[in-house]
Amino acid sequence: MEQTFFIIKPDGIKRGLVGEVLKRVERRGYKIERLEMRTNVPNHIIDQHYEALLSKAFYPAIREYMTSGPLIIGVLSGNQVISGWRHMMGATRPEEALPGTIRGDFAQAAEDGATIQNVVHGSDSEASAKREIALWFGK
């Protein structure tokens, strides 16, 4: 079975969407292999997680958003779970996410208008999933 890493981001927790997200995961037939709440995630973990974005001008806003509250992190398993979970999440930008996807139903722009609050994260490939699982849960 394939595995993927996921995060329910601070806005998802603040808005009470954890149960809805997990319900959708289970309804889809994916198995929740690991699940933890992390509070006070250090900047260096967020920096390693988003290492491809570190040089982008918008990155400081991402770090601030991702450290603004607790995160739920986990590992899902299932047949083609990486692509399936990404489909369930929907497009990154709320205005592009289709209704019926998690982001299409729940994502929104932050009050500052610059930060995207898109509720969830999922690994984009098998290599990313392995790297992210090791980063957050250890080898």
Image: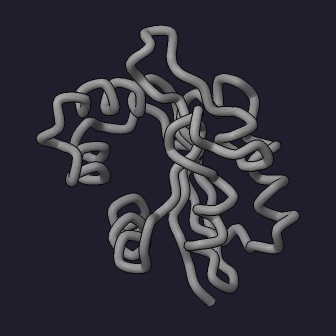
Q: Residue at x 64, y 62 (%)?
A: 87
Q: Residue furthest top?
A: 111
Depth check, front residue: 20 or 136: 20
Horizontal arrangement in the rendering, residue 40 relative to residue 81 (left or right): left
Horizontal arrangement in the rendering, residue 55 relative to residue 103 (left or right): left
Q: Residue furthest left?
A: 55
Position in image of residue 121 (x %, y %): 51, 50
Above-or-below relation of 10 to 127: above
Quarter of the image where the N terminus is located = bottom right
Quarter of the image where the C terminus is located = bottom left
Q: Residue furthest right?
A: 27
Q: Residue at x 58, y 33 (%)?
A: 95
Q: Residue at x 21, y 53 (%)?
A: 52
Quadrant position of residue 94: top right
Q: Residue furthest bottom?
A: 1
Above-or-below relation of 36 to 65: below
Instruction: State the scheme by which the image is colored.
Output: one colour
Above-or-below relation of 100 to 119: below
Position in image of residue 84 (x %, y %): 66, 71
Above-or-below relation of 3 to 16: below
Position in image of residue 39 (x %, y %): 48, 34
Depth check, front residue: 30 or 94: 94
